[in-house]
Image: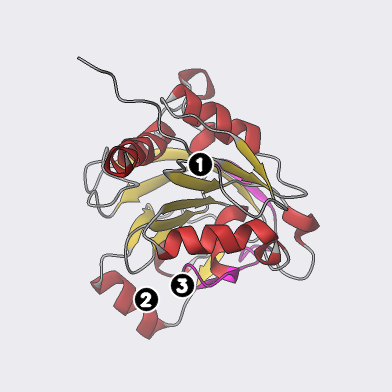
Amino acid sequence: MSIAPAPVIPVVVFPGSNDDRDAQRALELLGAESPRVWHTDEQLPAATAAVVLPGGFSYGDYLRCGAIARFSPVMQAVSAFAADGGLVLGICNGFQILTEAGLLPGALRPNESLSFVCRDVALIVETSESAFTSRCGQGRELSIPVKHGDGCWFVDDALLEELDANGQIALRYADGANPNGAVGNVAGVLNGDGNVFGLMPHPEHAVDALLGSTDGALILGSLVDAARLSAAVLV
């Protein structure tokens, strides 16, 4: 019986990214081939099955978080990949970049406390019917760390209701665990087609029991599973 090859899931690196190697290592531990791609590259690697935009402080978070990174040459390739149905995951700063690029709804504002937050948080899985949460049961509680100063996701009430009705809210902070004041306790949101996902928590820091939780592997493992299926279709 032949073994399916490791899906290619590149991690994009911007000036100021600092979780790219963590994401790369986590994805490789979960069975992916994960080359790092520099922000000036105009094309994604051949056979790319999914893309990850990692956490950090792209361009020092000047102007707004992600506002400069969205103009990097690689983002044209990422946007085209997403438009064709490719899987794209943005973690923390990557989430900020995706909202700035218009690939995800909403905006990320400074934390309600106006303080940097770094701690484990409890999350509730709102849907398991996505490429990014398929290993999770709906309603399951996860423990994954956050570390951000601008993680307060915001949309108006009408759009929040619409996103909720469409099943685009994939993760919420558990009651009392919201670390940043995000509206609706939203921790992670999907685009309308379900192939682009952004979340503020860092699943790449929760794949090893030595760090206190392996719940992040459920998120990244779901992506690897979906990327493997996507790669198989392309062959």
Q: Is residue 116 magenta?
A: yes
Give the dominant element type of the magenta stretch: helix, strand or loop: loop
Residue denoted by label 3: 105
- Rendered residue at 56%/48% (across/down): 44
Q: Amino acid at mark 1?
A: Ala
Is 18 displayed left or right of 160 in the figure? Answer: right
Q: Vertical placement of 192 versus 23: above or below?
A: below
Crowdedness of circle 3 by 10 Å Cα count: few (<14), some, many (20+)? many
- Rendered residue at 24%/48% (across/down): 128
What are the residue bounds of the magenta stretch? 100-119
How far apart marks 1 and 3 lie (CA) works out to: 29 Å
- Rendered residue at 39%/47% (across/down): 123
Looking at the picture, the colour scheme in use is: secondary structure
Is 132 displayed left or right of 28 in the figure? Answer: left
Q: Which mark is residue 46?
A: 1
Q: Is residue 215 magenta?
A: no
Residue denoted by label 2: 160
Residue 178, how many percent across, how many down? 48, 56
Whichever of labels 3 and 2 marks the residue nearer the N terminus, that label is 3
